[in-house]
Image: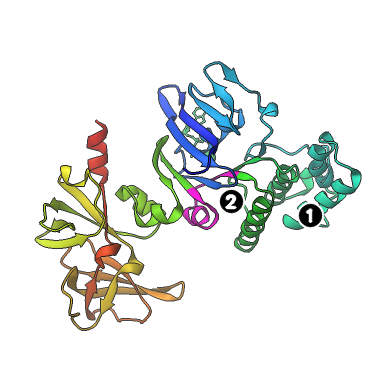
Amino acid sequence: MTQEAFITVKGLTKRYGANFAAQNIDFALEQGAFLSLLGPSGSGKTTVLRMLAGLAEPDSGHISIGGKEIYGPKRNTPVEERGLGMVFQDYALWPHMTVAQNITFGLRLRRLSSHEIRARVQEMLDLTALTGLEHRFPFQLSGGQQQRVALARALSIRPPLLLLDEPLSSLDTGLRETMRHELLEIVQKSHMTVINVTHDQNEAMVMSDRILLLKNGNIQQFGPPAELYHKPKTAFIGAFMGAANIISGIAQNSQSDDLIIEQNGLYIHCASSEADVLAAGQFAVLCRPESIITTLSEPESKVNTFSGAVQRASFSEGRWRLTIQTPFREPLLADSAEQIQPGTHVWVTLPKDRCALVKTEAAVESAAR
Ligand code: ADP
Ligand code: MG
């Protein structure tokens, strides 16, 4: 990392009984970055966020923010002294205060002028589409509206670090997309660093500079969205990030610099080559449906080209997603601008530079033993 890290987390671990909710979490994040903690339900996202906030005490590890240690073997800075903005699923609004009073509360503590406070509250009401509801009490609001008040309250103080636990999850699609957009604009304008919890890989990709993917309390991969999408380290990561063809087989030694995977006597050439890849035999090739080229006549290049038959064609998001039976064990998914009727004989080509070599779950598990 060229810039000095704003947040550094090392070896952060939290156990509940014998179960690791988070294990050895390490990452560093530059100031102004938007990080999403992504993973299936129960993977440890909320636990990591609560430890950063000071709402859950780690068993071990270090956390530094802005060059200051806030958690370590000899330090545990209390939540109110960490100066963070947060929206947690169970972090309730003040029930006896109106929407406007809830938003204003933190600003008054910070001794802003009443002119500044009025402007800030109006900006927050606009952002969260709550204008007109400012005099209501929390019990007079829907769950989604309450979540937006919590977001407005957290953003209003312009914290250097904003922690969000699925604050947009209960909103309907239209409002969610608008709010994603405007939230990004506000945090960028005020150079806030954000750590956002989500189980929605699309939201994580759209919003984040970095994604930290968790499973069973362990980091699977940490990097920019496109890296997790196109160069996942494992089949699990690849499948979690979006629709994927995962073709398992045996890695072969080759003379040239490309890697070859064999399944059922068929060979797939892949581009990516990590040093440890050829050590073990069982691997998989990951190729996204949108990367596969489907043609009605046999293409000239025979590299990674296979014959097949269309089984199904379903229309979604402006293109056809074909299910194609090929000599591989599992049918392939391939996207096509044109409709191709089921039963049609086709050729599919998996472009070599779009074929990533990934570890299978079996290989990951045997390495962990
Ligand atoms: P996520 O936010 O990714 O859904 P959590 O961080 O909430 O996951 O939970 C991670 C794991 O820790 C889960 O197995 C969950 O059941 C467990 N866990 C979380 N909080 C507690 C708690 N207070 N007591 C016992 N187990 C917990
Ligand atoms: Mg959670």
In this image, 357 relative to 151: left or right?
Answer: left
Is label 2 within 8 A of ligand 2 (CB to nearest ligand atom)? Answer: no
Give the camera-side residue of 171 and 235: 235
Kindly tell me whether residue 129 is visible in this rendering.
Answer: no
**Magenta residue check for 209:** yes
> Who's the residue at 21% across and 46% down the image?
277
**Magenta residue check for 240:** no
User: Vertical placement of 91 versus 79: above or below?
Assistant: below
> Who's the residue at 44% across and 33% down the image?
25
Secondary structure of residue under mark 1: helix
Which residue is under mark 1?
123
Secondary structure of residue under mark 2: loop
Give the camera-side residue of 289 and 132: 289
In contact (CB < 8 Å): disc 2 and disc 1: no
Span shown in magenta: 194-210
- Going by the picture, which residue comes out furthest to the top? 74
Q: Position of residue 74 (x, y in %)?
A: 55, 15
> Who's the residue at 44% across and 38% down the image?
43
Locate residue 296: give its quadrant: bottom left
Is label 1 within 8 A of ligand 2 (CB to nearest ligand atom)? Answer: no
Question: How busy is the neighbourhood of tag 2: few (under 14 within 10 Å), some, or many (20 plus)?
Answer: some
Disc 2 from disc 1: Cα separation = 22 Å
In this image, 333 relative to 130: left or right?
Answer: left
User: Vertical placement of 344 versus 317: above or below?
Assistant: below
Kindly tell me whether residue 101 is visible in this rendering.
Answer: yes
Give the camera-side residue of 2 and 295: 2
Which residue is under mark 2?
169
In this image, 73 relative to 250: left or right?
Answer: right
Q: Position of residue 340 (x, y in %)?
A: 31, 81
